[in-house]
Amino acid sequence: MKAAPPTGEAAQAPTIYEVAAKAGVSIKTVSRVLNGEPNVRPAVQQRVRAAVAELGYRPKMSARGLAGGRSYTLVTFLDEGLTMDHWRIGRSNPYVERLQFAGMLQCRKAGYHLLVELLDPASPRVEQWIQSTLAALNPDGVILTPPISEDKKIISLLERFGAPFARLSAIPSDAACLTISMDETAAAAEATNHLIDLGHTRVGFISGGPGFGSSALREQGYRSALAARGIPIEKRLMADGGFTFEGGKQAAAILLKDKNPPTAIFASNDEMALGAIHEATRRGLAVPRDLSIIGFDDFPAAQYSIPPLTSMRQPIDSMGVLAVQRLIENAAKQRGAPMPKDRAVVPHALVVRASTCPPPRTAAKRATKA
Amino acid sequence: MKAAPPTGEAAQAPTIYEVAAKAGVSIKTVSRVLNGEPNVRPAVQQRVRAAVAELGYRPKMSARGLAGGRSYTLVTFLDEGLTMDHWRIGRSNPYVERLQFAGMLQCRKAGYHLLVELLDPASPRVEQWIQSTLAALNPDGVILTPPISEDKKIISLLERFGAPFARLSAIPSDAACLTISMDETAAAAEATNHLIDLGHTRVGFISGGPGFGSSALREQGYRSALAARGIPIEKRLMADGGFTFEGGKQAAAILLKDKNPPTAIFASNDEMALGAIHEATRRGLAVPRDLSIIGFDDFPAAQYSIPPLTSMRQPIDSMGVLAVQRLIENAAKQRGAPMPKDRAVVPHALVVRASTCPPPRTAAKRATKA
DNA sequence: AGGTTGATTGACAGCGCTGCCATTTACAGC
DNA sequence: GCTGTAAATGGCAGCGCTGTCAATCAACCT
């Protein structure tokens, strides 16, 4: 009487017409209830919900996307080169894994879906690629992971295309987007202080590669912590590890073969810290007895290393959840509108495990093999 | 002249109408070219492709999905409980990670997208949940991972709903679907033989939990290998590790505290093998000198353990690629039709690293602490 | 040359939903 | 009781594509 299904056949999956018929309302009212729009009497809402439940109805994503402009989809862009490298050598990428999963769980709560795409910022056709990808997927929001989250070109492209996006672990810029990160500098300083508090004065530092904004920030934290304690900053106590396990190993090798090696090393991510432990162990140094090592990020692997790694936690899960939340909120509020410039700082925390302790009494006692 | 965009305004993203106008053909012809349908003159194809390239056009997924019934989307179902457990304790799940990534890469090639969903087989509303999820997403195919791939109920549900699906690492059933796996039994036998060939006669076995079809198969391979060599099968040389690190540790503890402990252990997955190494080391046993340990799966972590783990490779990447390929082929051939019952076996391979070697001369020489 | 077949193309109707606008209904206020 | 206003609904036109089927065109027969 109110509305009839256009198809006279028993459909495989129920459509909004069936629900409307069963509830005795128009499809538009069903739509209202489903989308939480106001001005539907409680009694009617109940009837609709009952019909929905009975039919096991769920609106078809593609139909919603086509009609409403909202795709109920969020996309995460990963750096193609970085990801493929990880992939080839069979290393997992905890950052991506945690982020993706946390994001997915959060999306689920809102009936959203999270897609993952690889993006090669160096490709000559990035612009075209981004445009067509956005067109095809029509995502309600985009999540940028490092190092892409720091890429000026990508950022301005996304801005130009008017896509709401969030940048993770990045230095705030004045782009119209949400930037989510921890206070890298403060956290790095705290990590360094942990070592100093333990009694170390020769504290080595392994930095990450350029291209990652956090790299510079963490180094700055290290420097400022030393400076604040009146400890001189020595170039020979610093080496680059490019944020990789191998790089960390090599950097540690350089630091440790010095005539006057550090008694503690702050590696600016866990992978490098693990590499450093590996290298130290290989050289016959006991960690932490002979050499304390602290990492950064507190990736899952940190708790299972030997010895378990002391690290500064970067709350990736929270960042993922927050990004998803805000992106969805934005989409719900004003479809298609870019996300207003904003900044969110998530709290970090020192996680003390077994890879750090006070320095050995006599530094000379250590036996350092070539 | 042939076709005009229905909207008189400059759209944000180009639609098929713009392309058609620019190429001077009807939208249907553009559609044909884009979908590789036959019967379009080469000259016309070229014009269309040029227009597509110039505009950076890509068909909108939702429109395609709505109109054609194909969503260009594949869904992977993960076991909710298992996944959440991994998640909470901060362990990564290499199986899922590799599968998902390999699948994603393969999807990309065909313009497809891979979604990941959590499914709780124990929920009283699974049926409803699956139905509505399939309705909402309308995926062109579903990938089932263990232990869900073994779940009778889920399988029959999927069959009933007519969704084409692939089961990974599962024992073939007579459901209308593709079953992809390695020859678990043969592989397990080969792993066992590797140990026997090395000279071991007391070979322990750590089994996985029930619910995983591969668990029984691997144990069978172990048994048959021993039998084939005339080595008696002893209950005390076997323990259950539930496919987890902790379980592997505990199982190893049980095996090693025996009066006449094994000189080698075959753990039926890498996680347990790593746990076994951990336990052995904790007890003062050197791996592999005092105790050889072989794993199964050859997960990425195997190559980074200390010592690097000898393992039997399960080609998860290939399985993911294959599943995606076949599912897409099926969708292209006959939209909506269930996948014909089929079986694919992917090749395994022994990867010898440093955790296995001949047994010690005198077993009594070993010092086994409680 | 007329007819026939098959290749090539276009017209058009939806797919299932939401946005916009019209309509109806419910309550105030006077 | 009668407008005025806001709350509740319904009607309907698409969103951008693909499927179906009809129309056109070219080459091939007899």
Image (spheres, coloured by chain):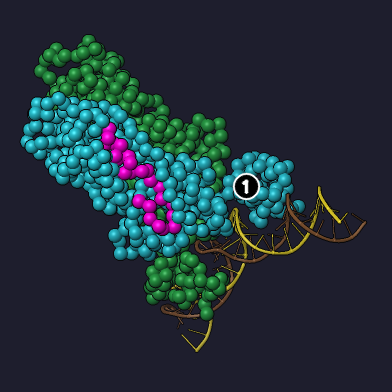
Chain colours: A green, B cyan, C brown, D yellow
Q: Is residue B173 above or below residue B296?
A: below
The image quarter in which residue B358 lies: top left
The image quarter in which residue A354 lies: top left
What segment is highlighted magenta in the picture? B171-195
Whether residue A156 is visible, yes or no, is yes
- Pinpoint residue B357: horizontal percent, then vertical percent: 23, 27
In the displayed structure image, the side of residue B363 where residue B158 appears, left or right:
right
Q: Crowding at label 1, few (<14), some or many (≥20) Cα neighbours within 10 Å?
A: few
Residue at screen point 65% across, 47% down: B33
For the residue labelled by badge 1, is the local secondary structure a helix, a strand or a loop?
loop
- Pinpoint residue A322: horizontal percent, then vertical percent: 35, 47
Q: Which residue is mark 1?
A: B36
Which residue is at the front of the view, B111 or A45?
B111
Whether residue B100 is visible, yes or no, is no
In the displayed structure image, the side of residue A135 where residue B131 appears, left or right:
left
User: What is the chain identity of the residue bearing mark 1?
Assistant: B
The image quarter in which residue B278 lies: top left
Q: Amino acid at mark 1?
A: Gly
Which residue is at the front of the view, A70 or A6?
A6
